[in-house]
Amino acid sequence: MPVQKRLPLVSHPHPTAVLEGIEPFYTTEHGAAYLGDSREVLKSVPDRSINLVVTSPPYALHFKKEYGNVSKTDYIRWFMDFAVEIKRVLTDDGSFVLNIGGSYEKGAPVRSIYHYKLLVALVEDLDFTLAQECFWYNPAKMPVPAEWVTVRRIRIRDSTEFVWWFSKTPWPKANNRNVLKPYSKDQIRLNRRGVKETVRPSGHLIRTSFEQVSNGGSIPPNVFEDESAPEDFMKFGNNASNDEFTKRCKQAGIGIHPARFPAAIPEFFIKFLTDETDLVLDPFAGSNTTGAAAERLERGWIAIESLEPYLEASKLRFEDSTPAAKVGLR
């Protein structure tokens, strides 16, 4: 079949021009979704053409999920095949953001270290740089394994996941001015009262220079904050039952991806690490949370997913976007 006709030009090349010769599953004004194994689709992406890869692949859990997941013993070898292609397609100042969660070993109240092994392999074997480790607090996580948490009660609920920010060099493109958050009440109070010059017990010098709130906001921590609660942790549950995407899936009788990650994560990193002319890619797109976030922020995006039902459902994220997205051209 011929390649989908390009849509009107925007500030960046449309992704269908980047993956010439491959038919997209659907397109929007800024992006294109592809059905297939991302190890194969990525081979058609030119070297150094992607500014940001942000993704949440299947975790190495000891019980099987409907979307497929690899065992802990095979996980590193499995993921490195993708990682080699991810590094190749990244620009020299590009970034790779990976959301990954931990798990218990089977049959014992002992935590697996598979994700730490992956971190070491990405840095030592593929020469990625760990720019920063970030954390997602997910209050919606179930108290599992039930045997250790709710039956024997010898462990506490696991409610955090890693969001690792990798880069090809120590100097990836980044600008934290794009992700400033409102000043806290304490900062505003200090601004009004003034501060005395002092040396903290840690040795840090506190100067009397915070005289006015003039920088546009506070630099966010690496434990993100929910915009609706700017003084709290990043509390992003992934069990929403009344968001627009979930409502549309229910109305259409379409199954919902069981392991969606919150839009706030890709939105944060797209703002932080890219410009409007840049291109974002998610090789484990699922219900295409990343693509929808990039569309709202007017970045080019490429989504790759191996399971058609999830990609079909993801069209519903763009119903209020462009005519092309509503049609879901194949």
Image (cartoon, rainbow, N blue to C red):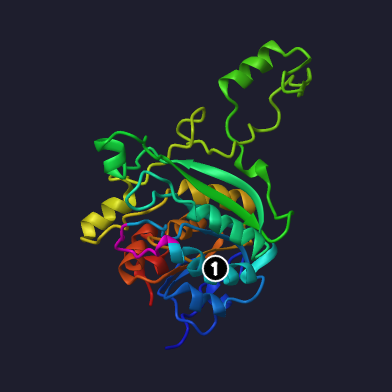
Amino acid carrying label 1: it is Met
> Residue 325: x percent and y percent?
40, 66
> Residue 208: x percent and y percent?
78, 17
Q: Is residue 209 above or below residue 23?
A: above
User: Is residue 68 located in the magenta-colored stretch of the structure?
Assistant: yes
> Residue 31: x percent and y percent?
50, 67
Front position in the image: 16 or 149: 149
Which part of the image, by quadrant, shows the N terminus? bottom left
User: Hey, which residue is sitting farthest front in the picture?
Assistant: 108
Q: Is residue 22 above or below residue 291?
A: below
Front position in the image: 14 or 125: 125
**Residue 196 horizontal side relative to residue 142, left or right:** right
Which part of the image, by quadrant, shows the C terminus? bottom left
**Residue 189 horizontal side relative to residue 252, left or right:** right
| Residue at image coords 49%, 33% | 233
> Residue 77: x percent and y percent?
51, 68
**Magenta region:** 63-72
Query: Image quadrant of residue 323?
Result: bottom left
> Residue 97, can we see it?
no
Q: How many marks?
A: 1
Q: In this view, does 260 lie above or below 73?
A: above
User: Is residue 115 located in the magenta-colored stretch of the structure?
Assistant: no
**Residue 109 horizontal side relative to residue 172, left or right:** left
> Residue 163, can we see it?
yes
Magenta highlight: main SS:
loop
SS at circle 1: helix
| Residue at image coords 49%, 29% | 232
Label 1 CA crowd tier, 10 Å (few <14, some 14–19, many 20+): some
Mark 1 — residue?
Answer: 80
| Residue at image coords 66%, 43% | 176
Query: Image quadrant of residue 89?
Result: bottom right
